[in-house]
Image: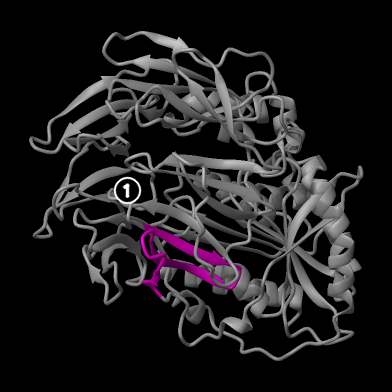
Amino acid sequence: MMHPTRRLLQFAAVALLLATCRSGYRDVAQYSIEQFLNTTAVGGSSFSSDESSLLYHSNESGIYNAYTLPVGGGESSAMTHSEDNSVFTTAYFPNDNRMLLRSDQAGNEIWHIYLREENGELTDLTPGEEARSLFAGWSHDLTGFYYRSNRRDPKYMDLYFMDIGSFQDRLLYENDAGYEVSAISNDGLQIVLSKTHTTSNTDLYLHNLSSGETTHLTPHEGEISFSAQDFTSDGDGLYVLTDEESEYAYLVRFDLASGEREIVEQVDWDITYAGLSWNGTYLVLGINNNARTETRIYEVATGKQIRLPQLPAGDIISPNISRSERLMAFYHNGSTSPNNLYVYNFEDRSVTRLTRTLNPEMVEADLVQGQTVAYPSFDGLEIPAILYKPLQIKPGELAPALIWVHGGPGGQSRIRYSSLIQYLVNHGYVILAVNNRGSSGYGKTFFGLDDRRHGEDDLLDCIRGKDFLTGTGYVDGQRIGIIGGSYGGYMTLAALTLQPEAFALGVDMFGISNWVRTLQSIPPWWESFREALYKELGDPAEDMERLRRISPLFNAERIVRPLMVLQGANDPRVLKVESDEIVAAARANDVPVEYIVFDDEGHGFVKKENRIVAYRAILEFLDTYLQGT
């Protein structure tokens, strides 16, 4: 079996040749950031009890609110009208048109579950200033729902059941050992607990809620990942993703009585999720196929693969099969096509498009398709990436470029619509979205190569991306910057401090500047993941020297390139002080530094008005210091 990144490198030479030799170009309309962000972002889907409408969320008002649409198409109806905190949809009630919704306060990620009555009245079902609550599914008898909450202990998420007749809840499982509840059987008597040791080593336990008995399902040695996906309908089996004796995660079915395991699906890429439809008729799989999502659906009884509708370039994502198993809602997304909601009818194979989210003032053909490429790093390792070339580059012209670094650690740049990427490409910037070592999607060996090497080998992968860009023949090697958010923001700061001459500038969006403080101040609800985080990045109690060495703040005197920093004041993951301090240190070097803080945002910018300010400022910064205009 050939490793996917090696296949990518073979194709990269061809891709680079095509990109370099392409002599044609064309003028495209140049769109403002307001036009780009007048494209509507939508997500979530839940069928009403009679399956006549869908509940979803949209930011068409400038902030996320809940909406409904008829499944046959038509006008949307707003269900909430928030002007301050985003509201995200969870589910319709099983027997009427009440709804469950989710919201936090200004991006603090302390989520609460809200009941929306049919008359529009909202009730917080999970109150508590520090209590974080997350929906975990309807009970199969439809008398209530499960949810996880840390209201008893901020460090651990317990499992609760809330009866929707009385709206009284009860504690089902008290979690004092740092487990995560991964799956719940249809009869409500069994749950699967997941224990994360490292990012590549997990264990599963079967817990009986009646007897209190816990059984270890996955005893093993070494770094092996197990992830529970769903119980079989009868509760006798369990679908699990694992990479045991494999580079890639594949799907197996555990027989809970005998302990025997049967491989259900295995491919040359990671299977990322699997689950059964409500009555167990269909098995739905998602495959991370070369930075794209491949969705597969099988009839469980026959093993027959269901033929999905043929749509334009892009991926079918987030499938949701109705309880009758007659309809399926899904989204379609691609480089030039933002999320659009569809409904598929299994009986007559018809497909109905419910939304048209791209701003009608914009022409999709003016946007750029991402192209998967690969290039060799400093040690010969093949690095996958996604290349976006502006359509308007003329023959012989050299354009400015950006290395784009995803979040994480362990994230992945994927071929999906990004308003910021398309906005920058539309204004003449080549972008190479790098999946440096440590990125997910390319096998567990690749994934683990950056463990306790952050800011070192992974940064060199990004720097080698410059060679690829200059090799295209249409990028000016002196005008290449680096940009990223969260972990990508850290990589931006690391580049400007640890390799200060490598890039012409850096744009850091809420990136870590001080690993010591970040690892000491992770949110309390991350307690179950603390050990894994320390094993990947380092324990401040034991690795202080190395953490200081790779922390941009302690190397800030080396910053000599222009820096832009954007931050949400309520970010619980990367505290605002991280950005405050690196900005102050960089300004002491007498280099250009721009700093923007949004008082009503958290880890990422959700409100449309804030994103307009942020993205416009990024382009102006690039035009000033990279484009030279």
Q: Quarter of the image containing the C terminus?
A: bottom right
Q: Which residues are magenta?
A: 328-355
Q: Nearer the viewer, residue 170 or 231?
A: 231
Asked where in the image residue 545 lies, by quadrant, the reply is: top right
What secondary structure is the magenta-colored segment mainly? strand
According to the picture, the residue beneath numbered tag 1 turns out to be 104
Kind of residue at badge 1: Asp
- Count the labels in the image: 1
Asked if one can make out residue 501 in the rendered structure from this viewpoint, the answer is no
Q: Is residue 275 left or right of residue 325?
A: right
Q: Quarter of the image containing the N terminus?
A: top right
Q: Residue at x 73, y 90 (%)?
A: 26
Does the magenta-highlighted stretch encompass residue 437?
no
Q: Is residue 170 left or right of residue 577?
A: left
Q: Nearer the viewer, residue 505 or 68?
A: 68
Q: Residue at x 50, y 15 (%)?
A: 217
> Relative to 101, is 249 above or below?
above
Residue 353 x %, y %: 40, 72
> Relative to 444, is 237 above or below?
above
Residue 342 x %, y %: 40, 66
Q: Residue at x 46, y 47 (%)?
A: 571
Q: Nearer the viewer, residue 16 or 310?
A: 310
Residue 615 x %, y %: 55, 70
Q: Is residue 521 left or right of residue 377?
A: left
Does the magenta-highlighted stretch encompass residue 341?
yes
Asked if one can make out residue 403 in the rendered structure from this viewpoint, the answer is yes
Q: Secondary structure at mark 1?
A: loop
Crowd around label 1: few <14 · some 14–19 · many ≥20 (10 Å): some
| Farthest residue, direction front | 302
